[in-house]
């Protein structure tokens, strides 16, 4: 997520006998990359029995694991269950799990959610005469040139590229350099996927779900 979000979600179900009731007030905010999910409660007073805190936590975990945007797992945010309401008879574990899950989904969608994509460190070794073509190809793949070093008759280009843009890259390098260039790849980190690509991924996921 890029921002903060909050929700007040009420789960109420009545069918014949015992019903279900739970209301969860939740706020979320981003954490640094790699810090994971932090679930806390800042409940005050007697509005919600603390026995239901783990139930809300289970609902949050289920929503994170299932994913909300295009089915991808949710990462790196802080969740605060700060208030709510309960019913003396109809409030139970499953009701607070459901309310927690849906309060989290609403908070998440209000917090400028986005998708992350893996970024790869790429080092390309090519004869100097092919440098222009290779660097142009890197730029065309949404890549960033991080540095260039000389290595005898070869040039070493260090770059970072989205993993999604590296399909058939080895073949392309050989083609651009007459078979004289080669490269290595190592995972670097994750970055926010640009909005235009994000929308395409989400649309494709929705189409797949509808089929």
Image (tube, rainbow, N blue to C red):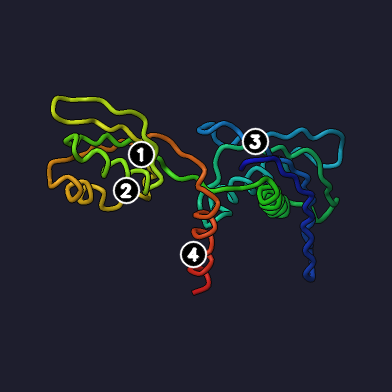
Q: Name the residue under label 2.
A: 166
> Mark 1: which secondary structure?
strand
For marks 1 and 2, the one nearer the N-term is: 1
For discs 2 and 3, the disc positioned in front in the rendered view: 2
For marks 1 and 4, the one nearer the N-term is: 1
Q: Name the residue under label 3.
A: 78
Mark 1 vs mark 2, CA separation in Å: 9 Å
Q: Quadrant of residue 26?
A: top right
Task: Please state the horizontal and vertical placement of residue 163, each as a whole percent of the image.
Answer: 36, 46
For marks 2 and 4, the one nearer the N-term is: 2
Q: Quadrant of residue 48?
A: top right
Q: Residue at x 64, y 49 (%)?
A: 59
Q: Which residue lies furthest to the bottom in this view?
A: 211
Mark 1 vs mark 4, CA separation in Å: 24 Å
Mark 3 vs mark 1, CA separation in Å: 27 Å
Q: Is residue 128 above or below residue 19?
A: above
> Mark 4: which secondary structure?
helix
Task: Please state the horizontal and vertical placement of residue 165, each as a whole percent of the image.
Answer: 36, 50
Q: Do the residues labelled 4 and 3 touch (CB within 8 Å)?
A: no
Q: Say whether residue 68 is left or right of residue 94.
A: left
Q: Name the residue under label 1.
A: 120
Q: Are marks 3 and 1 in contact (CB under 8 Å)?
A: no
Q: Are marks 1 and 2 in contact (CB under 8 Å)?
A: yes
For marks 4 and 3, the one nearer the N-term is: 3
Q: Name the residue under label 4.
A: 204
């Amino acid at each position: 997520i890029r921002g903060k979000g909050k929700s007040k979600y009420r789960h109420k179900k009545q069918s014949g006998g015992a019903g279900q009731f739970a209301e969860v007030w939740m706020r979320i905010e981003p954490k640094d990359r790699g810090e994971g999910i932090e679930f806390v409660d800042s409940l005050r007073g007697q509005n919600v029995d603390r026995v239901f805190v783990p139930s809300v936590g289970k609902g949050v975990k289920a929503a994170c694991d299932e994913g909300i945007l295009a089915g991808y797992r949710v990462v790196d945010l802080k969740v605060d269950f700060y208030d709510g309401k309960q019913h003396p008879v109809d409030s139970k574990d499953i009701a607070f799990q459901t309310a927690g899950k849906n309060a989290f989904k609403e908070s998440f969608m209000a917090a400028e959610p986005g998708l992350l994509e893996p970024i790869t460190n790429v080092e390309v070794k090519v004869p100097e005469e092919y440098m222009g073509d290779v660097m142009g190809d890197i730029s065309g793949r949404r890549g960033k040139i991080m540095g260039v070093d000389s290595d005898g008759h070869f040039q070493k280009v260090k770059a970072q590229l989205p993993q999604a843009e590296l399909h058939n890259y080895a073949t392309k390098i050989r083609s651009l350099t007459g078979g004289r260039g080669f490269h290595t790849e190592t995972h670097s980190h994750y970055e926010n996927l640009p909005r235009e690509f994000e929308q395409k991924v989400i649309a494709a996921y929705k189409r797949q779900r509808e089929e």
